[in-house]
Image (cartoon, helix red, strand yellow):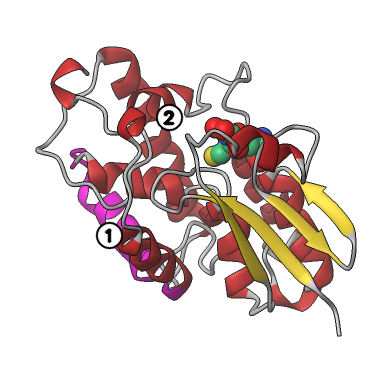
Amino acid sequence: MSQTTLVIADKNYSLWPLAPWLCMKKVQMPFTEILIRFGQKNTRRRMLEYAPTGRVPVLIHNGLKVWDSLAICEFINDLYPSENLWPENLETRAQARTFAAEMHATGGAFPGAPRHIIYSLDTNVRRRTDRVEPKKHVVESINYLINRWQNLINTFGGSGGFLFDEFTVADAMSAHLVNRFYTYDIKLPDDITKYCKNMRDFPPLAHWIREAEAEDWTLPSAEIDVSKL
Ligand SMILES: N[C@@H](CCC(=O)N[C@@H](CS)C(=O)NCC(=O)O)C(=O)O
């Protein structure tokens, strides 16, 4: 029997482990989890035990190590080709991959890379603030993302309620953004509110959210003062 471990960090505060975790739950891949808490004296040392980047997620599958969220999603797709973690149609799949890569390239040069959202609205799954009105450059990123989601839903969506009708890696890479919009009560158009709700009702994401809410510790550096945003 194969042995699979996913190394992650706090569910409430971490960003990148979420996408592969969702894909693994979606395909019902059995795995054990190692959770390394952020902000501890040994956090970096422990993460370095699993990958030279000193970052999570890291997948260990029968001794093979894969790190980086998108690479893990691709590997899960390779292991479970019939689960359609990417759309079947070649051109549609290229669009899904373009979007997922764009979401992943936070530090990159893409105008739409959601770095302003990530750097301004910290991941904090269980927190609920009053409506935050972010700064102009963050609003521009949010609007760009909303526009991208709308275009994908209008072109490829269907009754399934996801960007490409059924859940794909493109949704997995969007999930942390969906959660941030809930945390900070960001004003969204109706169609995108519907997409976000569908995502949060998706059983694997609902599962992650429950577990994030159950974590009984806080990371003070991630509890940002929203009045300063
Ligand atoms: N490009 C990597 C980024 C991984 C990453 O930055 N992970 C964060 C957690 S969300 C991390 O491990 N940070 C280490 C730390 O803050 O100590 C990926 O997509 O997996």
Is 79 above or below relative to 1? Answer: above
- Say above or below: 107 vs 203: above
Q: Position of residue 19 (x, y in %)?
A: 57, 54
Point 49% across, 56% down: residue? 163
Asked if one can make out residue 104 in the rendered structure from this viewpoint, the answer is no
Residue tagged 1? 194
Which mark's residue is nearer the viewer, 1 or 2? Answer: 2
What amino acid does circle 2 point to?
A: Ile
Q: Mark 1: which secondary structure?
A: helix
| Image quarter of the C terminus | top left
**Image quarter in which the N terminus is found:** bottom right
Taking the spot 29% from the left edge, 62% from the top edge, the residue there is: 197
Magenta range: 185-203
Q: Give the residue drawn at x 58%, y 72%.
A: 25
Magenta span: predominant SS is helix
Q: Is residue 21 above or below residue 227?
A: below
Q: Nearer the viewer, residue 169 or 40?
A: 40
Q: Which mark identifies residue 76?
A: none
